[in-house]
Amino acid sequence: MKKIIVLDIPGLVGANIDKNKTKNISKIIENNHSVLIPTFPAVTCSAQSSILTGTYPSEHGIIANGYYDKTYKEIHFWDQPSKLVKKPQIWDVLKEKNSKIKTAVLFWQNTLFAKSDIVITPKPLHLENNFLMWCYSKPENFYEEIVKEIGEFDLKWYWGPFASIESSKWIINATKITIKNHNPDLLFTYIPHLDYAGQKYGPESIEFQNSLSEVDELIGNLIDFLQSEKIEYEIIILSEYGFNQVDNSISPNIILNENSLLQTRKIGGKEYIDFELSKAFAMCDHQIAHVFIKPGFEKTVTEIFEKQPIGEIFNKDKQKELHIDNERSGDIILTSEKNSWFNYHWWRDEKNAPDFTFSVDIHRKPGFDPLELFFDMKTKKISHDTSLIHGSHGIIDNENSKLPIIGTTISEKKLPEKLDMVEIMPRILDFLEL
């Protein structure tokens, strides 16, 4: 049986590969690589669940980075329990084949309480006015063992205005310790660094190119470690999506608010979305938005968005074609134009915006907020200026050079020219040679 490391580098596409600028990545994938067709939507949680289960969002149920809880009438973003994924993940499948196979997963989404033998995922403890940085881990206290060697993981490196290469360095160093101490047969590692430059500056920027070089150097560092320790692993590199350069943002909830469809409640002088009484509201996530509509208002809402400068509107029939039809999906799904992205804002006057919208608060915001990467030094708050964002994803650009890639050091089992994301899991099982 082979031993395999899977490195997930979001934002990496065929156009990025250059033997001079990405020499380490190029060396890994040069003899066996493929263009990867993402599942829709091309966002982190959906893509990672499709990779780990070999199924579409219509089956595994991760329809975005968030979901609308109809019982509590709340939108949840970045919830981590693996039970949210409604299909078996790859370690579940492997355990049925061979209970002795050891798996590890570092920093992938929806891996909290997963049945993988080794898990590390951020799980800060929220205190009254602060939070205590911590990572959930298996085996118990494995994170604490790592801390003794390389120090604590700092969540500020991972997301927010201070996000940096330091998060990916820590994850790579934790990967080395995982290999040295536990020697897993299959290891998944997430390397987020390219994602920051992709959103802040866009894929056409010099900052993105510099971040690509930094990621390549990290890959080289891992290769050097494996060689110096004489540890034999095959490596698979894959990406979840490519970025689109953007210069415009659309506010579906403000549009619904202006048409008296989205209702708000004033609490403490601030406006909050009333999910119970609203006739429609949008859960925005990069370049897609799930719109939830009360019965009888579907035609009205659709006609409103047909007049807006957006991409497409997917009704339930179209959702079936795209394998995104699920009980968690919106009544309609909007896509932006290629150069645009959807923000979650609902207030028409910024003074009515709740305080949490000005902070890094990934769980209370009813939509993904890339502006959390920007801190306004004058106000000492997270900016609401949507023009700051220059890269987004979610829709799928079918031009080969802009599609994500998968490549591997395993040369004897050739990948096809194009590979659907749901085919990755069975390919990995085949590569393992169980």
Image (cartoon, rainbow, N blue to C red):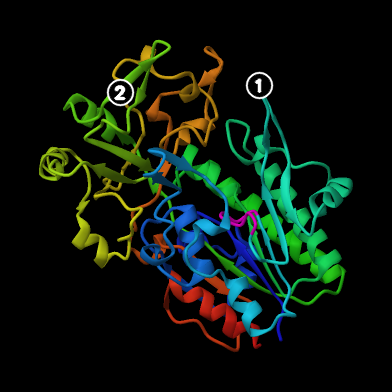
Instruction: State the SS at label 1.
Output: loop
Horizontal side, residue 215 vs residue 374: left or right: right
Q: Position of residue 350 (x, y in %)?
A: 36, 16
Residue found at x 21% / y 51%? 312
Point out the tag, 1 or 2, that comes first from the N-terminus: 1
Pointer 1 with pointer 2, Cβ within 8 A:
no
Q: Which amino acid type is marked by label 1?
A: Asn
Q: Which amino acid type is marked by label 2?
A: Thr
Residue found at x 16% / y 27%? 259
Q: Is residue 251 visible in this depiction of the protein?
A: no
Q: Which mark is residue 129?
A: 1
Residue 217 falls in image quadrant:
bottom right
Instruction: Establish if 250 lies above or below 83.
Output: above
Q: Which mark is residue 264?
A: 2
Q: Is residue 353 magenta?
A: no
Q: What secondary structure characterizes most of the magenta part?
A: loop
* Number of residues whose C-alpha sits closer than 10 Å to that of mark 2, classed few (under 14), some (14–19) or many (20 or more): some
Instruction: Establish if 9 lies above or below 246.
Output: below
3D distance between C-alphas at marks 1 and 2: 26 Å
Residue extent of the magenta highlight = 107-113
Residue found at x 30% / y 23%? 264
- Nearest the viewer among 46 and 140 is 140
Q: Which mark is residue 358?
A: none
Instruction: State the SS at label 2.
Output: strand
Residue found at x 56% / y 69%? 89
